[in-house]
Amino acid sequence: MQIKSINPYDGQINGEYESTNQEELLRRIKSTHLAFKQWKNTSFEKRATMLVAVASELEKIKSNMQRPSPAKWASL
């Protein structure tokens, strides 16, 4: 079954995703938990370096992320 992610602002579909079963969900939760354990044991310096790299990548694609104009917000 497909699950749709709908933007509540404009009603557009952000994406469609397959639903998952409980076994897969538990696997993903375990994987996330293990990743968090690694992250919390990562030094501040390494985390900072990684987050700066993420910020740099977001800067490259920010033109694809649009905000509604102030006039559009005012009409809500």
Image (cartoon, helix red, strand yellow):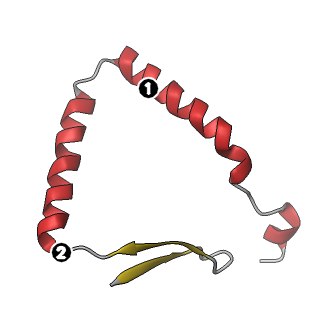
The amino acid at mark 2 is Asn
**Residue at image mark 2:** 21
Q: Any mark on residue 75, and which?
A: none
Q: Quadrant of the C terminus?
A: bottom right
Would you identify the image quadrant in which residue 14 lies?
Answer: bottom right
**Residue at image mark 1:** 50
Residue at the bottom extreme of this rendering = 1
Residue at the left extreme of this rendering = 23
Image location (x, y in percent) of residue 6: 54, 77
Height in image: 29 above or below 37?
below
Element type at mark 2: loop
Local packing at callout 1 (Cα closer than 10 Å; few below 14, some 14-19, many 20+) is few
Would you identify the image quadrant in which residue 3 lies?
Answer: bottom left
**Relative depth, front residue between 27 and 68:** 27
At a point 58% along the width and 35% down the height, the residue shown is 57
Residue at the top extreme of this rendering = 45
Q: Earlier in the sequence, mark 1 or mark 2?
A: 2
Q: How many marks?
A: 2
At a point 79% along the width and 68% down the height, the residue shown is 73
The amino acid at mark 1 is Met
Image location (x, y in percent) of residue 64: 70, 52
Image location (x, y in percent) of residue 9: 66, 74
Image location (x, y in percent) of residue 32: 23, 48
Q: In the visual, does 31 lie left or right of 14?
A: left
At a point 14% along the width and 62% down the height, the residue shown is 26
Q: In the visual, does 58 lie left or right of 73?
A: left
Height in image: 15 above or below 48?
below
